Each structure stands twice: as C-alpha cells, then as structure tokens.
Image (cartoon, rainbow, N blue to C red):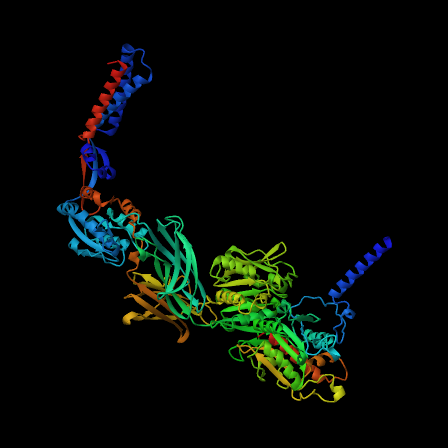
C-alpha cells in the first residue's frame, strides 16, 4: 500500500536525500509561494465581503489556507522535487547471509526447530529473489564464522554463539569484497557477553547495514535460569564457603525450590528458597563445607521444578581450589590469659591452621608454642620482614604498642599492606586504647576509631549481638540456617570482659556488638587494608563460650576457626597465579595473571615467570608470561586450552637463577554448556544491531520485504540516482483532496 | 514504742553493715572455715584475669581435726594468699590477691578454669559432683590436687577420681612435659614436706616416701588433672615466711604452682 501511494518503499524516504531538479533557484519558489498566498488573501477578502458579508472571521481564513496550500503544492511540483538514495548495483554486490548454527537453534518450537524456521523463511522466496539481484554468500556461525554453499549444511550443533566474532570477521572480509549488506539470522542467544561497541562501530564505519532475522520465542515459561554463581576460587580444606547464586524465572513466582551444591553428584548442601517476582534477578546464598584438599568441581543451582521448559539451565559449574597448605598465624600475647589457651585449643584439631604464640610470662621471659624448631622466634617478636612475612596472619593480644620498636610497628603495617597478611587486634587491659594503639602508627590498621583515653577495658560480663552484616558473614555462621544462627548467638554465654571501641572507619564492617546497659560498642569489625585485611575483636573473654557450654558444643571452636581462616586464607605466597574465571565455557582462551614477590614481598620486576600447564589427553605445554608495564611484579599471559577438560598450571618464578616461589592454578574448559542458557530470543540485541547499523529487524513472516529494501545501502558498489516525487499517486490525491475540502466547506457555508 | 522502733532500725542497720562487710571479705572472724587466717588485702575485690579457686568438697570423715570445717580448708586461706603474692611478683599474670572458694554443686566453677584441691586423700565426691568435675575438665578446666600421702589416702583419692574418669589412667608426668618447663625448668624436683616435718623429722608422711608428680591427660595429650602426691605444696606456701621452714622447699613449691598455672593458661 505504502509503495502504491508513494512509489518507493519507506526506506527510500528514511535514507534518501531530498532535492529540487528544476533549473530555477529555490528562493524563487519561496517568493512565488508567498506572493500567491498574499494574492489569494486579497481575493478571498474582497469576494467574501461581497458574497457573504456575515461570515465569521475564521471561515474565510480556512478557505484562504486551503487555496494557499494548493497553490504552494502546485508551485513545488513545478520545481520537480526528488529523492536520491544510494542503491546497490545489481549483480555486483555481495549479500552476506549469516545464519546462527548453534545448538540453541535446534530448539523445537511449534513443530519446527529454529533452524528450520530460518530455512523456511529464506526458501519461501526471499533467498531466490536476493540471488536474482545479487551475489549471495551463505555463512554459518557458532563460535566462528564458516562459509557454506547450501542451507542444508546447517546442523544447529555449534556449542556457542558469538555474534560479535561473526560480524567482526565479515567486516574484515568486506575490506576486499563488495559486501553490500548483511542478513543475520539468529535467536540472539549470544553467550560471549553480547556484541561489543567496537565491533558495531567497525560495521558502522564500513556503512554495512545489518538486517536481522529473529527466530525463537520471546518468552519461555515456566522456566528458571541461573545467571551467575559467585564463589571464592581458593580456600582451605574444611573451610565453610558460601555461594551467592543469582537467577531469574518466568511463571514460577511464589513456588518453593531447593538450592543445592553438589560435588560429583553428591549433595554437599541444600537450602529451601521461595521464588520472587517474575523476571527479576534474585540472589540467594547457600553455605557448605569445602571438604578435603583438591580441585573441586561444584555444581551449584536450583533443582528443576515441575513443568520447566529447560531444566538444563538450572545449574552452573564452578571450580574451587581447596588448598591443603597450612596457614601459620603468629599470636603475640603480653601476659598469660585464658583467651590464649582457648584460642589455641579451638584450632588445635584444624589441620590447616597453626598458631605460633609468643607469651610474655614474666617481664623478660617469653614462652613460645607451636614453633617449628627451637631457633624460631628465639629473639621474640620478629624484626626482619622475612621472619614476620613467613606468617599468614598475626594476632596482637594484650600487649602495649610500646612493646614494639618503631621499626617493628612499621613491619606490622607492612605485613598487612605489602605482604597481604591478616591482622587481628584483641581486647585486653593493655590492648587497643589502653595499650596506646590509638596514638600509634598502628591506629590506622584498627577497623574502628579508638577512644582517646584509658580505662576502656572492663572485666564485666557483656552480651554479644550480631549486626545485620554479622548475620550474613561466614565468620559468625554457627548454623547453616540464618534464623537458627541468630538464635544460637543469642544463647551464647556472656563474654568475660569487653573493651570500649569507637565508630567503625569508612570501609569497615561491624559484625557484632557488645551491649552493656544501654550502651553498645562494636565488638567484631573487619576491613581490608592494602593487600591484606585487619579485624578487631574487642574482648579477651570469649573463653566463656567454651567453659560455660557443654563440652560437646562447638560454638567457640567454630567461631575462632572461621575468624582465623578469614584472617589467613587469602594471604598470598610470594607467587600467586590467578585467572578471572576458572571455568571457561566454550572458549579456549584462559588469561593468566601472576603476582611475583621476593622474600620480603617487594615486587619482583626482573623475574622469569614460566607456567607449566598439564591438561587432558596430553594437552599441555609451557607459557612464558610477560611483565605488565602498568604494575611492577605482575606478569600476564594467555593460555589457549585446546580441548575441554581440567588443566593445572604450575607457575615457577625465578630471579637470577634463584627460585622465588611457585603456585598452582587449576582451571577447566567446559564445552556445550553455554547453549543451554539464555534460550529466549534476544530480540533486544537483534533490534539494536539492526538499528545501529542502518538495517532492519524482521520476523520470519516479514522477510518478503527484505529483497526490496536490502538494496538501499551505502556499502559495496552503489549508485545514487535522483527519483522524481511529483508523479507519486499520493501527490495527486493530495491536490484533489485540498480542492474537494474547499468545495465541501463552501457548500456547507452556502458561499458556492 | 519509739524505743522499740529505734532498736529495730539499729539492728537492721547493723545487720546490713555486717552483711556488706562479710560480702566484701572484711570480717574474717565471721568465717568458721579458715584454717589459718590471713589478713584481707585492700584490693581483695579487684577483678582480674586469674583467680586462685579452691575447691570445697565433701570429706570422707568429718570427725577430729576437720570435723567442723572439712578437709578442703587445710592451710586456707593463708597458703592461698601467700602463694598469690608470689605469683603476682614473679609473673605477668593479672592475679587477685585473695582466693575464690568454688564447689561442684553449682555452675559457678565454670568461671574459674583453674582449681586447687587440697587433702584429696579425704575427698568423697558424689556421682553428681564427679560428673560435674568431668564436664569441667572436658570443657578445658584444670585441677591441681595436693597434700595427700601414702597408699591409704591414694586409694581414697582414686575412689572418687574413678567416678570422674572411670577409664582414664593416672600416669607419671615425664620430665620433658611442658608443665615442667613452661616458665621454670623443673627437671630437679624433690619432695616438699609439710610443717609436720618439724614434729616427725621426716619429709614424708605415712608410707608416702617417694613424691609423685602424676597426671590425668586428655585425648590431645594435655594435662587435665595435675596430681602432687606425697608432698605438701600448700604447707610450703603457707609457711614460706616461717624462718625455720627451708627456703628450698618453699621455692620449689612456688615454682611448681606457678608452672601449673601458666601451663593451664596455655594448654
């Protein structure tokens, strides 16, 4: 209809440039239109005064307007208006037809797979019409683009969809080929994180319009899909971990479901959850025990619900490296206290934590426990970085800050800041404010402000209360169930003593408070500091949790194990290798990042860093990492994992022949998983691609319009011809319409 | 009528004052349990980290010397307070100057992770008390027993101990055990006699000729009960200031006591 009235398809009007083909100047047209309007005004006024003197003021004006428009339009047509648009030259241009060949295209909807829907839409005429006018090249793409000759070569079996990579490749090809336009047929279920701006702007720069053909349902229900699972990539054996699981669902609001963590099919933890509003991302937390050392493949997700359209998108796999190495914590205590005994006992059976304590029994005598050999810490608290930095955590009990030399105080600061260790301040009669810490260089390491006075330590019983953050924290998790955990904390015996603290510092998190009468103080607060972390536990009296509860009760032990694991687990060795995502789905590229430090944890900038990788079926090799120009001591590289499976990269750092350290990273390449996710047609993405490149989004039923519109393109080999507009049927109808309207009004007002 | 009211008020005030003073330990003459009274120090009510907790237990025989007070009061409180002066002077432990008496009939004992029991050759724990002591020790409490001698008293001691731990052996503490090295190296140990040696001329009592440093260990190899058999450390603390009492005995008794406290606070 549009084309019947306006002679050309809408694209011509949208993309075209307008001009007047008559040889006379445009300003003359304006002058003549103005003159005609004035002349008509004078005529209308004179005639009306004579024939219909009683006619209200606005009616003659309406008649004048209709006559002026008619005159103006006739004058415009004399000037020959035209539109010119770039069109592809027939037979000289290539139309690239890119068809998604990933597994999600095999999804059957209404009796036909998505792939079959594409083939049917193309075969019903558009493809032969395109072939008649252009050279058509067919491509299929999954992770990469591949040329095919016939549509029956589509298999819908590629394990992933990377639309961006396909467009990038075709844009590169267009440098040597006259690619006039692209037709992209897909469900838009891209799993490389979308199409980046650079790719789109490259396509736009080459002025290639990308027309998109969208297939697949835009709403799949009922269905639940996991979108992300956040979990630490490393931990110590027997540590408690929490997985933050984000998902969204359609058609399942208000249903009850089970959040589960499995390892090799064995359930490690489950948690009942209630599903929230449809379409909204929902995040739930499930806690579980990491178990023994080794690389763990954990399947984390929601058990499939009745009637779910796609149960395969309910689970994501995560890899956790469970470390067997012991974390050594140095505990400096200024006087014999029950707290030392009971902290030591709490972690006594923990294979991964070792407390080495120095206790001032008398003014000049130190009693050491947990030392590796009689020489260790013989001179007392370490004065050299190599000695202190060998520990992963540090506890300062009731020991005055003046007990440490200024150099030792700086060393303690460096222990956290540079070495990345964890530092815990305990309360006590010569600790925190009463120990002079508030006015010392160590004050900035304390997560709370300290009162500027003495007498803050009180040997009075104090009840403990978890804060909102404390209820969420794994440090304070004595029960898996959040509510039962809060109740258990309420039942804990009072602390034997407490110490007044102050407001938490910016960035610090208060996990627990003590309340005495009407007053409350932060009891347990944590913060990150430099590369490490610090905490304050402003009491020396948590031993009552052990002595005042049944000997089988594990509250005291669990709390201290969890606090000390938090303190020491993340403390890196001199060499640390990481990758942003230890499970890569359907991609071979694994970026590696190594932080190399010497024994005093200064960045090792001039080291040789080599990763020895072993993989499945003998896949493996060596990769030398290159120093990062931005960060000294950081080395980066990319390992290409040729096959799916588990890989281990042992990174060895050497400097001038001496080995500085080594670290192992386990990662996994997993294929064929990504295509189970995001199965709904991503129409938004397809429309965005079309809109930003000057193309158009089509449903299979609309594809007939494509051959007519695809030729309007500025890419490839084009011509630009002016097309007359004066002879459009719409123009003729407009002229007749104006004249008829005038006649109709005159009849009505009786001034014919 | 007014006189009676006045009398009543005076009695009430006096009673309140006496009760207050007794609570603040200011009236030793009101205590019928003291074996050897000692002055009440001014800081007797200080709140500290460590308290010398003396165990009050029922005795096998109530006649004779302990008829009124029970065997647990032996040397009390002078030994306790004199020993505590030494602990204060010789260590960094925050110590209260006076003892605390605890028993196995309430849960109050769990607030005192170190307990001293004297003359346990005469103790007689009920099943409930034995169960409470077992629970106390399993939670991490430490018991030091002292001043019992010979086979006969040992058997009485063991009768109650077997109700506490029917299946845990009593063993000799090896010289290398941390309890003998935690502050003082106590490889050279000898029998510490009680004041009775001035009357008998012997350093031992009954047939307890050889001193025994014994213990009951927990499953992780930590001492729960430290047993000082055939010696009288309590007397050595009590009579440390008696010119006639040999210094070497008093010194060893102090060193053993201090080591046992520091061991209990570190293991």
Which of A319/A493 is in front? A493
Q: Is residue A82 left or right of residue A573?
A: left
In which quarter of the view is residue A458 placed? Answer: bottom right
In the rendered image, the quadrant that contains the N terminus of chain A is top left
Rendered location of residue B117, percent (x, y): 66, 76
Q: Is residue A327 left or right of residue B200?
A: left
Callout count: 0
Q: Is residue A619 visible?
A: no
In the rendered image, the quadrant that contains the C terminus of chain A is top left
Q: Is residue A50 visible?
A: yes
Relative vertical location of residue A349 with respect to residue A153 in this rendering, above or below: below
Rendered location of residue A658, percent (x, y): 41, 76
Q: Is residue B147 left or right of residue A605?
A: right
Which of B34/A209 is in front? B34
Which of A551/A719 is in front? A551
Rendered location of residue A309, percent (x, y): 30, 53
In which quarter of the view is residue A160 placed? Answer: bottom left
Rendered location of residue A348, percent (x, y): 52, 73
Q: Is residue A725 left or right of residue A644?
A: left
Q: Residue at x 67, y 66 (%)?
A: B47
Relative vertical location of residue A12 with respect to residue A287 in this rendering, above or below: above
């Amino acid at each position: 209809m549009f084309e019947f009235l306006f002679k050309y398809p809408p694209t011509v009007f949208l993309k075209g440039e307008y001009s007047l083909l008559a040889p006379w100047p445009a300003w003359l047209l304006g002058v003549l239109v103005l003159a005609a309007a004035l002349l008509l005004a004078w005529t209308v006024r004179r005639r009306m005064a004579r024939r219909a003197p009683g006619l209200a003021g606005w009616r003659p004006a309406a008649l004048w307007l209709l006559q002026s428009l008619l005159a103006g339009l006739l004058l415009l047509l004399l000037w020959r208006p035209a539109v010119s648009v770039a069109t592809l030259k027939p037979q000289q241009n290539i139309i690239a037809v890119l068809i998604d060949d990933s597994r999600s295209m095999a999804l059957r909807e209404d009796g036909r797979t998505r792939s079959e829907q594409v083939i049917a839409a193309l075969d019903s005429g558009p493809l032969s019409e395109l072939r008649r006018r252009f050279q058509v090249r067919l491509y299929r793409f999954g992770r990469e683009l591949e040329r095919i000759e016939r549509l029956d070569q589509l298999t819908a079996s590629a394990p992933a969809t990377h639309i961006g990579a396909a467009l990038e490749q075709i844009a590169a090809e267009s440098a040597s080929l006259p690619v006039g336009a692209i037709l992209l047929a897909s469900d838009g279920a891209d799993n490389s994180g979308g199409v980046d701006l650079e790719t789109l702007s490259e396509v736009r720069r080459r002025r290639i319009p990308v027309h998109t053909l969208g297939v697949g349902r835009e709403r799949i229900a009922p269905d639940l899909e996991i979108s992300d699972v956040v979990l630490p990539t490393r931990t110590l054996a027997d540590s408690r971990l929490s997985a933050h699981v984000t998902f969204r669902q359609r058609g399942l609001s208000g249903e009850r479901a089970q959040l589960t963590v499995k390892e090799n099919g064995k359930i490690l933890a489950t948690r009942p959850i209630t599903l929230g509003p449809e379409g909204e991302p929902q995040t739930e937390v499930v806690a579980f025990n990491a178990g023994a050392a080794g690389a763990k493949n954990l399947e984390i997700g929601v058990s499939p619900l009745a009637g779910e359209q796609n149960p395969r998108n309910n689970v994501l796999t995560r890899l956790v490296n469970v470390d067997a190495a012991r974390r050594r914590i140095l505990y400096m205590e200024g006087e014999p206290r029950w707290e030392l005994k009971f902290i030591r006992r709490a972690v006594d059976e923990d294979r991964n934590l070792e407390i080495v304590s120095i206790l001032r029994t008398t003014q000049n005598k130190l009693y050491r426990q947990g030392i590796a050999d009689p020489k260790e810490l013989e001179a007392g608290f370490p004065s050299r970085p190599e000695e202190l930095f060998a520990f992963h955590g540090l506890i300062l009990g009731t020991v005055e800050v003046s007990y440490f030399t200024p150099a030792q105080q700086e060393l303690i600061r460096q222990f956290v800041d540079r070495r990345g260790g964890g530092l815990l301040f305990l309360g006590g009669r010569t600790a925190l404010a009463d120990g002079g810490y508030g006015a010392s260089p160590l004050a900035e390491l304390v997560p709370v402000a300290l009162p500027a006075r003495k007498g803050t330590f009180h040997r009075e019983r104090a009840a403990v209360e978890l804060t909102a953050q404390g209820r969420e924290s794994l440090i304070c998790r004595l029960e898996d169930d959040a509510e039962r955990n809060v109740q258990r904390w309420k039942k804990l015996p009072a602390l034997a003593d407490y110490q007044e603290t102050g407001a938490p510092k910016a960035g610090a998190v208060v996990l627990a408070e003590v309340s005495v009468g009407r007053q409350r103080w932060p009891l347990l607060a944590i913060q990150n500091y430099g590369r490490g972390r610090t905490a304050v536990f402003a009491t020396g009296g948590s031993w009552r949790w052990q002595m005042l509860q049944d000997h089988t009760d594990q509250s005291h032990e669990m709390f201290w194990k969890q606090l000390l694991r938090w303190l020491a687990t993340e403390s890196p060795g001199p060499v640390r290798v990481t990758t942003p995502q230890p499970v890569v789905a359907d991609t071979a590229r694994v970026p590696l990042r190594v932080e190399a430090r010497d024994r005093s944890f200064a960045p090792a900038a001039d080291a040789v860093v080599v990763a020895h990788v072993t993989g499945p079926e003998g896949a493996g090799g060596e990769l030398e990492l290159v120093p990062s120009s931005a960060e000294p001591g950081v080395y980066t590289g990319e390992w290409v994992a040729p096959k799916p499976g588990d890989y281990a990269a042992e990174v060895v750092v050497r400097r001038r022949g001496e080995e500085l350290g080594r670290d192992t990273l386990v990662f996994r390449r997993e294929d064929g998983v990504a295509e189970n996710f995001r199965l709904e047609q991503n129409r938004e993405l397809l429309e965005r691609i079309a809109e930003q490149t000057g193309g158009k989004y089509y449903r299979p039923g609309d594809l007939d319009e494509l051959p007519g519109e695809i030729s309007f393109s500025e890419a490839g080999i084009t011509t630009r011809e002016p097309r007359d507009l004066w002879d459009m049927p719409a123009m003729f109808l407009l002229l007749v319409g104006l004249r008829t309207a005038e006649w109709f009004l005159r009849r009505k007002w009786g001034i014919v | 009528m007014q006189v009676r009211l006045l009398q009543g008020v005076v009695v009430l005030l006096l009673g309140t004052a006496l009760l207050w003073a007794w609570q603040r330990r200011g009236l030793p003459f009101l205590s019928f349990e003291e074996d050897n009274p000692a002055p009440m120090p001014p800081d007797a009510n200080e709140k500290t980290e460590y308290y010398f907790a003396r165990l009050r237990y029922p005795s096998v025989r109530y006649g004779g010397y302990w008829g009124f007070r029970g065997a647990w009061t032996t040397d009390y409180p002078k030994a306790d307070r004199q020993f505590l002066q030494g602990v204060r002077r010789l260590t960094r432990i925050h110590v209260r100057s006076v003892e605390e008496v605890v028993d196995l009939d309430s849960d109050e004992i769990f607030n005192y992770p170190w307990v001293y029991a004297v003359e346990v050759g005469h103790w007689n724990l009920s099943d409930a008390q034995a169960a409470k002591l077992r629970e106390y020790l399993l939670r991490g409490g430490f018991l030091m027993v002292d001043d019992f001698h010979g086979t006969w008293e040992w058997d009485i001691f063991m009768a109650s101990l077997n109700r506490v731990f029917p299946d845990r052996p009593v063993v000799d503490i090896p010289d290398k055990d941390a309890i003998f090295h935690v502050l003082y190296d106590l490889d050279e140990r000898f029998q510490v006699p009680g004041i009775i040696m001035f009357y008998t001329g012997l350093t031992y009592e009954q047939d307890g000729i050889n001193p025994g440093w014994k213990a009951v260990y927990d499953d992780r190899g930590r001492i729960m009960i430290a047993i000082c058999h055939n010696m009288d450390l309590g007397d050595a603390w009590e009579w440390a200031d008696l010119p006639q009492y040999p210094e070497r005995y008093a010194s060893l008794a102090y060193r053993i006591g201090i080591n046992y406290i520091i061991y209990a606070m570190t293991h």
